[in-house]
Image: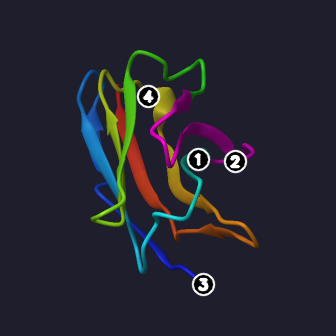
Amino acid sequence: QVQLVESGGGLVQAGGSLRLSCAASRSIFSINVMGWYRQAPGKQRELVATITSGGNANYADSVKGRFTISRDNGENTVWLQMNSLKPEDTAVYYCNAIALVATYWGQGTQVTVSS
């Protein structure tokens, strides 16, 4: 079992930046893939970015060049640096961990980008 707690969301103007954090309740060293997803009102949850234990990152086309995912296995934390934010980035952002036997989700953190 692992609990994931997101933080860092908030209200920001278009063009601004936010840094989301995801703190895990135990070591993430053995968790191969950590990621961030988001869900806007009335829309399905979608992939934002993932990162493997080896540091290989993958991004949705809509955030490439603006968002950066990183992880520190020693601190049991994953971050999502979001720059040049747009109103369409407004959503609840969820942390995700894909372990060998289960997938875990955090409770989400709201990001609102005003125009």
Mark 4 vs 2, N-terminal side: 2
The amino acid marked with disc number 2 is Arg
Spatial CA distance of label 1 from label 4 is: 17 Å
Q: Position of residue 9 (x, y in %)?
A: 33, 53
Q: Position of residue 31 (x, y in %)?
A: 56, 62
Q: Is residue 13 left or right of residue 68?
A: left
Disc number for residue 45: 2
Residue interval drawn in magenta: 41-58
Asked whether residue 55 is drawn in magenta, I would say: yes
Asked whether residue 67 is drawn in magenta, I would say: no
**Residues under numbered marks 1 and 2 in contact, where contact means CB atoms less than 8 Å apart:** yes
Decide: few, some or many residues near mark 1? Use Cα within 10 Å; few <14, some 14-19, many ≥20.
some
On screen, residue 83 above or below 54: above
Examine the image and state in which quarter residue 112 appears. top left
Decide: few, some or many residues near mark 2? Use Cα within 10 Å; few <14, some 14-19, many ≥20.
some
Spatial CA distance of label 1 from label 3 is: 20 Å
Find disc 4 in the rendering and name its residue. Answer: 87
**Residues under numbered marks 4 and 2 in contact, where contact means CB atoms less than 8 Å apart:** no
In the image, what residue occupies the spot 66% across and 65% down? Answer: 99
Assign the C terminus to one quadrant of the image. Answer: top left
In the image, what residue occupies the spot 47% across and 39% down? Answer: 90
Find disc 3 in the rendering and name its residue. Answer: 1
Q: Is residue 13 left or right of residue 65?
A: left
Spatial CA distance of label 1 from label 2 is: 7 Å
Examine the image and state in which quarter residue 110 appears. bottom left
Disc number for residue 37: 1
Numbered disc 3: secondary structure: loop
Mark 1 vs 3, N-terminal side: 3
The amino acid marked with disc number 3 is Gln
Spatial CA distance of label 4 from label 2 is: 17 Å
Numbered disc 4: secondary structure: helix
